Amino acid sequence: MNKGELTYVCDPNWLPYERINLNGEHEGVAADYMNLLSERLGVPFRLIPTKTWAQSVLLAKAGKCDLVTMLNKTPEREEFLDFTEPYFTCPVILMRPEEFSLESLDDLHGKTVAVVKGYRQEEEFQRDHPEIKLLIVKSSEDGILAVKNGKAAASVATLVEAYHFTRVHRINELKPTKWAVDHDYHRVGVRKNDPLLLSIMRKAVSSLTEEDRHRVEEVWISVGATESEKGLPRWVILFGVGGLVVIFAWLILARKAH
């Protein structure tokens, strides 16, 4: 590959997966993975800063970047991106108030669900569940806070996000669904119609080892209960620990299948 660098966009407000911090630096799970891929290829990756995920998607649609760090493959996105195999997999759940019994999506008909602008669930809920009202928010954190503040009956989040933000905000009154809506299969998005770059990125992703993954994920996904976490709802600790064990097991099984 003759390029001196590869440019990329990310979600600037999506901890613990990734964010652009106050110094303009990319950090989080995806950032550490991008550093590993850059090392594998021997090519520097350069971040194109954005303010929102929607802005990052627009730049990718316009072909103004080589890569998108971490996203699911959807029919709409396949119109302007190609994709590597998944490098991080996580269950997607719904956060809801403790008193609200949520056994299936039918229970949300006529109610409001918080969904991040530009996330695949916005597209999927509009298509498959038009009876559900959508509150479009800027981040998963905003969605969880919307439920806490009574602006939504539930919020779409991954297990990792739910654990992270309920811990950060010390939210006791929200619970996760007992079932996963589906799973996120996070991949690297690659600029459309560049088969050489796609082949290179797919090989780079396939070179990631379990040791690489554990090293990255142990930094950003805490499964231990610290002193500051005492007093949080028991599901945060148990679901956080147990769920993340499931995630790592799923990762291993999913990668064996590919």
Image (cartoon, rainbow, N blue to C red):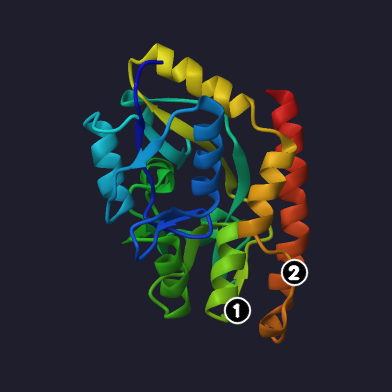
Residue 19 seen in this snapshot: yes
**At 42% from the left edge and 79% from the top edge, which residue is drawn?**
150
Q: Which residue is mark 2?
A: 224
Counting residues from the start of the chain, the first of labels 1 and 2 encountered is: 1
* Depicted 236 relative to depicted 40: above or below: below
**Residue at 47% across / 78% down in the picture?**
148
Query: Which residue is drawn at the image coordinates 52% and 53% (left, top)?
Result: 17
Q: In the figure, residue 140 lies in which quadrant?
A: bottom left
Query: Can the viewer see residue 97 in this picture?
Result: no
Coordinates of residue 163 in the picture (x, y in percent) = 62, 66
Q: Quadrant of residue 85?
A: top right
Crowding at mark 2 (Cα within 10 Å: few <14, some 14-19, many 20+): few
Badge number at residue 99: 1
Residue 178: percent from left, percent from top = 69, 60
SS category of the residue bearing label 2: loop
138 relative to 113 in the view: left or right: left
Given residues 117 and 64, the one toward you in this image is 64
Q: Amino acid at mark 1?
A: Glu
Q: Compute the Cα span from label 1 to label 2.
A: 27 Å
Identify the amino acid type marked 2: Gly
